[in-house]
Image (cartoon, rainbow, N blue to C red):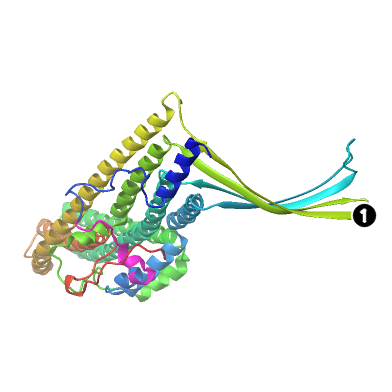
Amino acid sequence: MNRTLRVAVACATAAGLSACAVKAPAPQVDAQAPAQWQAPLPHNGSRANLATWWRQQTDTLLAELIDAAQAVSPTVSSAASRIAQSRADQVAAGAALVPNVDAAGSVSRANQQSLTPMGTTSQAALQASWEIDLFGANRAARDAAQARYQSAQAGWHDARVSVAAETANQYFALRACQQLLDVARQDAVSRADTARLTELSAGAGFESPANLALARASAADGNSRYLAQRASCDVNVKALVALTAMQEPELRRRLAGNAKVDVPAITPAFGVTELPAQTLAQRPDVFTAEREVAAASAEVGSARAQRYPRLTISGAVGIANFHSGGVNTKTDTWTIGPVSVSVPIFDAGRRRANEDAAGARYDAAVVSYRATVRQAVSEVEQAMVNLDSTAQRTLDAGTATQGYRTNFNAVEQRYKNGMASLFELEDARRTRLAAEQNQVTLARERNAAWVALYRAAGGGWTAPAASAAPASPAAN
């Protein structure tokens, strides 16, 4: 064994103790990161917990629609496919760390002009080869594949959370539309009744033709608003059908059987004034960005290790049989080697360029991670601001609606008794209608803020007093 081979074997032995490993950049960033580096998946990665969060709300139909939407979502299916692909890549990368064993067999018949008689040679063997990971290139590739597998898992949860939020928003939009439809129907009926009374008064000579024209125009406008609102609700139903793949007649039946007087509102079991840092860390996009940093770090180490020598050992063990003249001659064979060492000498800077590119990707991953965390904080804060705003405005909106309704009823009675003009009545009607629509819209905004907070928190949260220890990322 020459000196070069002795040095290579010595380094291979030391590699088991990581003495020859090439260090990659530590997958860490500065204090801008959340307090928890290894983020748990939303709802601890549990499909049941995700559904439970919605079932805890006031409307059980919503949870069923979300389940249906997730079952048929192409986004969720694509995310599941990426998990399968990443798992295969992880297995392939891990396989590079262990010896490869192949079975080989052959049969040949030959006649040579020599002392060897004509005969048939058959043989079978197991052949093995192993690249000893001297400088950690294969380990780094395995770590990168593992990080991307975990990232794919988080992407699947992110897809589920996105579908849940989209379905909830569409459902609340439909409920708000139905409430606005009821307001428009009542307004159209009121306007039509006013037009009928005005027409009777005009026929008796107590109202001018101009007032009659105004009353008819108001009735037509009210009916037009009602028809437009009904069409909008039908469009919302069809959008929900497309999301859930539920048959439209069945969906309409379920909606009618689950009708509510007011727009349904998400009512948590606790007040939300702040969210802990680990809640942000459970966001799948934050977890994915962190895993991309880890994968990019590992790829730097793998690219750097390609600039150092590579050691490969191979060998074989087998049996052979030579048949000639009715006589079988059997032999056992084995080989160790060759032990080969590949030492990079000149590649015109290709390996160094690959390392630089991997380093640039690592820097980009760190920047992206920090930006993702900032965006997560911003989205949570915006959702909480909207929640606080809608909560403060809800009481005022209710008071305003009740007051304008009372005023309209009073003006309407005065009009019927000839003590108020049609212009006063129409002005009171417009004010009441705007207040009623604003109250429904405000309830819709509050629900949208809750859904936004659910999405911003990575798929729900648990009250601080009941928080359990975060679970490690796991596939479901």
Identify the secondary structure beneath mark 1. loop
Residue farthest to the right, as pictured: 325
379 or 36: nearer the eye? 36
Would residue 169 be seen by someone viewing this image from the given angle?
yes
Q: Is residue 7 left or right of residue 365?
A: right
137 versus 40 height, above or below: above
| Rendering quarter of residue 62 | bottom left
Residue farthest to the top, as pictured: 348
Q: Is residue 199 left or right of residue 325?
A: left
Classify 10 Å Cα crowding around label 1: few (below 14), some (14-19), many (20 and above).
few
Asked whether residue 244 is drawn in magenta, I would say no
Can you give x and y, in whole percent of width and height, for residue 48 in the image? 37, 72
Can you give x and y, in whole percent of width and height, for residue 121 in the image? 82, 48
Can you give x and y, in whole percent of width and height, for residue 294 in the image? 33, 48
Q: Is residue 421 left or right of residue 471?
A: left
Residue denoted by label 1: 326
Can you give x and y, in whole percent of width and height, for residue 196 in the image? 23, 64
195 or 85: nearer the eye? 85
- Which amino acid type is marked by label 1? Gly
Q: Residue at x 13, y 56 (%)?
A: 385
Q: Give the residues drawn in magenta, as a range.
A: 35-49
| Rendering quarter of residue 201 | bottom left
63 or 460: nearer the eye? 460
For the C terminus, the image quarter is bottom left
Asked whether residue 39 is drawn in magenta, I would say yes
Residue farthest to the left, as pictured: 419
Would residue 449 be seen by someone viewing this image from the given angle?
no
407 versus 212 height, above or below: below
